[in-house]
């Protein structure tokens, strides 16, 4: 097997993606940990995998999600550090919602930044996810009291790209609902503006209330509506080639 897939949180969208890659792309081998206590997975999974992934000379590519501390794994297993290392972000810990900013654990975001620095390719599931991570690095690193690293965004950004999560699974709820004929109405925030056209977005609670009142008065608007956006870019048919290309070693690489 030339593609080594490691998933430290094997559940939800993390599980769905790696299962799909293993099913659709030949020459893959998968190692996982159950989707429990993600805080502990982020802290210690690298040591576990360093001891439980067999040493093989035919690995060429390592694909993992950002839950894993890739820096620790490659330090513990130099043989894996020589591979083409792909890091996939389902979510990022620099902007992941917490009740209070003071409650954000610095270590999780810091680990993701370090993982980006050692990865060869960093993939995000949306442009919002990518930009919110990259543009937050500078502010995040200011939490360090002194002797702060510099220019990390400029170092990481050139290796970043976006490949959407494929619409093949029921829990990609809004897109699946639209595919089945529902009318989307989403905030003009987060990832929604890059998925839905402007007519399906609202900016304020007042705008949302007004739209909903209008729909209640005129339900025929919803019943007769034909969605005007594009669903094809999020389908597995459109994304299959991108993932295949991502998990292919370039001919000139000397790994």
Image: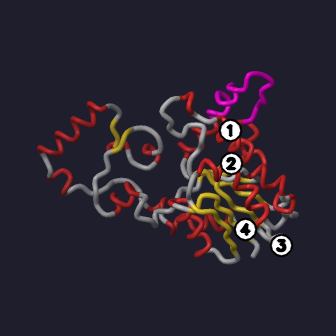
Sequence order check, earlier mark of 3 and 4: 4
- SS at mark 4? strand
Task: Indicate whether 243 appears above or below 162.
Answer: below
Q: Residue 161: x percent and y percent?
A: 64, 50
Colouring scheme, one of rainbow, by chain, secondary structure, one colour: secondary structure
The C terminus - image quarter: bottom right
Query: In screen coordinates, is 219 left or right of 228?
Result: left
**Whole-percent x, y for residue 94 in the image:** 60, 37
* Residue 44: % across, % down: 70, 52
245 left or right of 167 in image: right
Q: Which residue is mark 4?
A: 4
Camera-side mark, 3 or 2: 2
Q: Are marks 2 and 4 in contact (CB under 8 Å)?
A: no
First along the sequence among labels 1 and 4: 4
Residue contact at pointers 2 and 1, CB within 8 angstroms? yes
Q: Secondary structure at mark 1?
A: helix
Badge number at residue 56: 3
* Real-space CA distance between mark 2 and mark 4, rounded to the nearest whole angstrom: 21 Å
Which residue sits at x=17%, y=41%?
214
Vertical position of residue 181 compared to residue 42: above or below: below
Q: Which is in the foreground here, disc 1 or disc 4?
A: 1
How many other residues sit within 10 Å of disc 2, few (<14), some (14-19) or many (≥20)? some
Give the numbered dot on residue 237.
none
Which quadrant holds residue 173?
Answer: bottom left
Question: Label for residue 43?
Answer: 2
Give how far across and how far down residue 203 sits, in percent.
Answer: 35, 33
- Judged from this view, the residue extending furthest toward the left is 217
Q: Nearer the viewer, mark 2 or mark 4?
A: 2
Name the front one of labels 1 and 3. 1
Q: Which residues are magenta?
A: 135-152
Say above or below: 218 vs 237. above
Distance (Cα) linking label 3 and label 2: 25 Å
């Amino acid at each position: 097997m030339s593609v080594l897939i490691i998933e430290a949180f094997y559940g939800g969208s993390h599980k769905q993606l790696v299962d799909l890659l293993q099913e659709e792309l030949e020459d893959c081998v998968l190692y996982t940990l159950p989707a429990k206590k993600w805080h502990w997975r982020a802290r210690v999974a690298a040591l576990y995998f360093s001891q439980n992934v067999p040493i093989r000379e035919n690995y060429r590519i390592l694909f993992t999600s950002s839950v894993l501390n890739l820096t620790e794994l490659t330090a513990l297993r130099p043989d894996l550090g020589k591979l083409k290392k792909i890091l996939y972000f389902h979510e990022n810990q620099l902007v992941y919602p917490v009740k209070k900013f003071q409650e954000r654990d610095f270590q999780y975001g810091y680990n993701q930044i370090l993982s980006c620095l050692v990865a060869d390719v960093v993939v995000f599931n949306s442009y919002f996810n990518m930009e919110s991570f990259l543009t937050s690095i500078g502010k995040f690193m200011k939490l360090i009291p002194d002797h702060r690293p510099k220019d990390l965004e400029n170092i990481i950004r050139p290796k970043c790209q976006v490949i959407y999560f494929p619409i093949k699974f029921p829990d990609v709820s809004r897109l699946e609902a639209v595919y089945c004929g529902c009318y989307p109405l989403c905030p003009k925030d987060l990832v929604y503006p890059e998925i839905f056209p402007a007519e399906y977005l609202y900016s304020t609670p007042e705008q949302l209330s007004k739209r909903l009142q209008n729909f209640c008065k005129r339900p025929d608007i919803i019943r007769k509506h034909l969605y005007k956006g594009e669903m094809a870019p999020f389908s597995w048919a459109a994304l299959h080639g991108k993932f295949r290309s991502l998990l292919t070693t370039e001919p000139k690489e000397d790994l």
